[in-house]
Image (cartoon, rainbow, N blue to C red):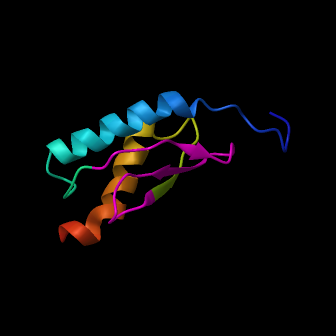
Amino acid sequence: MPYGVKMKVNTHDMKFEVQETLDELFGEHLIPFELTARMVNTDGLGEYEVPFYDSRIHSMRFSWRDGGSTLKEVVRSAALNRTKRYSGRH
């Protein structure tokens, strides 16, 4: 892809996978409270932000590009890192 050309990302579909991953983490007792993703925002260059419906954590950010880790792996890591101060895990 030429330099400066942004790749079109389907953030609507990504939202469902992000939410499924958050639900799994809560079900596995790895995050201390349920989080509901409002949407997935992107800059089109592999940087993402997920705003939440939660007063404790307003959003989480992560980087993801095809070819490395799966989206689920990246979201799991970002969610665990973002909630660790609330769960007592470090």
Q: Tell me if I can see residue 39 in this picture.
A: yes
Left or right side of 14 for 52:
left
Q: Quadrant of the N terminus?
A: top right
Query: Which residue is painted at 40% across and 46% down in the image?
Result: 75
Q: Position of residue 52 (x, y in %)?
A: 40, 52
Nearer to the camera, 73 or 19 = 19
Q: Quadrant of the C terminus?
A: bottom left
Q: Tell me if I can see residue 70 in this picture.
A: no
Main secondary structure of the magenta stretch:
loop
Query: Which residue is painted at 19% across and 53% down in the image?
Result: 30
- Looking at the image, is 14 positioned above or below residue 77? above
User: In which quadrant of the rendered view does residue 82 lie?
Assistant: bottom left
- Looking at the image, is 47 positioned above or below residue 69? below
Q: Position of residue 48 (x, y in %)?
A: 56, 49
- Looking at the image, is 46 positioned above or below residue 56? above
Left or right side of 9 for 71:
left
Assess whether residue 40 is covered by the magenta stretch.
yes
Q: Count of labels shown?
A: 0
Assess whether residue 8 is covered by the magenta stretch.
no
Left or right side of 76 for 49:
right
Query: Which residue is painted at 36% across and 63% down in the image?
Result: 57
Left or right side of 51 for 48:
right
Magenta span covers which residues? 35-59
Nearer to the camera, 55 or 14 = 55
Q: Position of residue 39 (x, y in %)?
A: 49, 41
